[in-house]
Amino acid sequence: MASAAEKHPAYNPSATPSPKARARRQLDLAVRGWFAATVLGQGLFIAFILLFYYTSVFSGDYAAWNAKPMITGYVEGDATGNHQFALHVLAAAIITSCGLLQLVPQVRARWPMLHRWSGRLFLAMALILSFGGLWLVWVRGSYMTIPGAIAISMDGLLILWFGTMAWITARQRSFAAHRRWALRTFIVASGVWFMRLGYIVWGVMTGGAGIERGLSGPFDLVWAFATHLLPLAVLELYLRAERGSPQAQRAMAGGLWLAAVLIFGGSLGAWFFMWWPAIMA
Ligand code: HEM
């Protein structure tokens, strides 16, 4: 029996989608591929934070942090610094979880209340991580090089700026602008995660060219800034491609698939070479 759609006078089973519609579909599919890789990669990052940091913080065994390479980590007698760092890692798992939740379209459509509260929690954690992170760098002195300290501070300031804009535009109910600022906030808040993935991917591809002890090599210095600026540039290209020509959308889809593959490989590498050995140490 023919369906209601098939009975419609405009129904034409042999009609092929226009190049514009096909390019749009390719772009949407690439976004899903990118998001699937990101969920896997950030899921592993959250698992690491829970299994390594939450267990040590809640059992009061702060000294266990130093089982993995740290800039400062646990310092005996430095109660303020240790507690500040404990707060930082506790907030890190929450912001990463909330960030992923915010991007799921079904959550926004079916549970708008959950989206709002998760968004508020994300922004509260962004304040803790950015101001707390700036304190760790400039007061506690947790940095390897001055350019590295400036780069991570820039990331913290971008998180605060974009997060504020996402909040303001949500309150104004300017949803198109809110979406853009929220995506930018997600990307810069993922900067520290991109940093770890980038080291793995670059290390495997080049054998560690430009990486020096003390993070003072050419790759270290460039990647310190590119870790948030490069993904941000990709996002800006995506926001333009969405409204661009079919060619631009197809090129963007290709770029996003490449990003998905790098994120997928980098995440598995980070888990097996960085995070799992630290958990098992
Ligand atoms: C919002 C995103 C952020 C997340 C998810 C995050 C997460 C983390 C995690 C998990 C660690 C532990 C290091 C590890 O085991 O790999 C860490 C360390 C650190 N973070 Fe963040 N962070 C964020 C933002 C920032 C910002 C904006 C700054 C600075 C302005 C910062 C400064 C630091 C410093 C200095 C350390 C090293 C502490 C040490 O080794 O002694 N973080 N962060």
Image: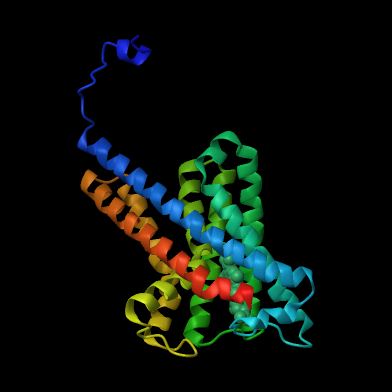
Q: Is residue 164 visible?
A: yes
Indicate whether 205 appears above or below 264: below
**Which residue does the image show at 56% across and 72% down from the upper left?**
275
Q: Indicate whether 205 appears above or below 173.
A: below
Q: Horizontal and vertical percent for residue 159?
A: 54, 63
Report the residue that reaches farthest toward the front. Answer: 280
Residue 150 appears left or right of 34:
right
User: What's the coloring here?
Assistant: rainbow
Q: Quadrant of the N terminus?
A: top left
* 277 and 147: which is toward the camera: 277
Q: Would residue 140 be found to the left or right of residue 8 on screen?
A: right
On screen, residue 153 versus residue 88, left or right, reads left
Image coordinates for residue 183, horizontal then vertical, percent:
48, 53
Q: Quadrant of the C terminus?
A: bottom right
Say if 77 sits above or below 58 in the image: below
Give the camera-side residue of 279 and 130.
279
Q: Quadrant of ligand 1?
A: bottom right
**Any part of residue 81 in sight:** no
- Residue 203 figure quarter: bottom left
Q: Quadrant of residue 134?
A: bottom right
Total numbered circles: 0
- For image coordinates 71% across by 72% down, the residue present is 86
What residue do we see at 56% from left, 64% from top?
45
Residue 142 picture location, percent across and down? 61, 84
Give percent across and percent down for residue 4: 37, 12
